[in-house]
Image (tube, helix red, strand yellow):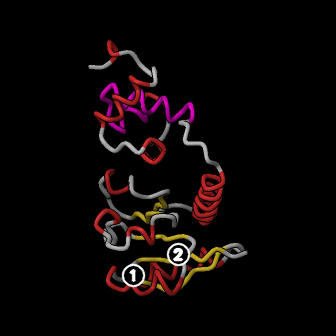
Amino acid sequence: MKRNVLIIESSEIIYKGIRDIINSCPQLYALQQIDSISMLDSRIITLHPDIIIANPTLFDLASYDLQEQINNIPKIAFVYQYIRPNILQQYDAIIDIHDSTNKIIHTITNVTLNTSTNESQESNELTEREQDVLILIAKGLMSKEIADTLNISVHTVISHRKNITRKTGIKSIAGLVAYALLNNLLDSTEIE
């Protein structure tokens, strides 16, 4: 079964490049281009996308009115300029303009697989790596510092932070500190 990918991008040349890459994969199909957020309201309902790839400068997920309708759709940020990390945290994955065709296809298919796996699993337990990230968050480290400490990319840290928030339902750092303490992930003497 093909997965329909909705692309939110104002540049026609970038849209066509992403579309051609997506359509080169037999499991994916690129839907038509949406070049502004105002068009999304009607299209999200009629097109029924399985995945959304969006230019984060055009599409602020946090302020979007149809949040409930896009909540269960995996969202991938397509980045070709600096985007603040708090905006990228809203996405399930990130594609960089310099990524190869294989890497782009791999990212899209992994998001699809991870979403299917997450929906089929009822466990909200944190993985060992998510616990490591949570402990470092509670100790006051920023995403870049966590990435350096754990020898992973900042994008991976952001993904773990998003999963931690989704699984615990806690959005504030103070709440995550309390969660870590209550679940014996760290001792109060370890917090600065």
Residue farthest along the top direction in this orientation: 189
For marks 1 and 2, the one nearer the N-term is 2
Estimate the x, y position of residue 115 in percent, counting from the top left: 59, 58
**Label 2: element kind:** helix
**Quadrant placement of the C terminus:** top left
Q: Which residues are magenta?
A: 127-147
Please tell me in which quadrant of the rendered image residue 148 appears: top left
Image marks 1 and 2: residues in contact by CB distance under 8 Å = no
**Image vertical order of residue 41 relative to residue 96, above or below:** below
Magenta residue check for 166: no
In the rendered structure, which amino acid carries the disc numbered 2?
Answer: Ile
Q: Residues within 10 Å of mark 2 (few under 14, many from 20)?
A: many
Residue assigned mark 1: 40
Magenta residue check for 144: yes
Please tell me in which quadrant of the rendered image residue 125 appears: top right
Residue assigned mark 2: 18
Q: Residue at x 46, y 61 (%)?
A: 96
Estimate the x, y position of residue 98 in percent, counting from the top left: 48, 62
Q: Is residue 85 left or right of residue 68?
A: left
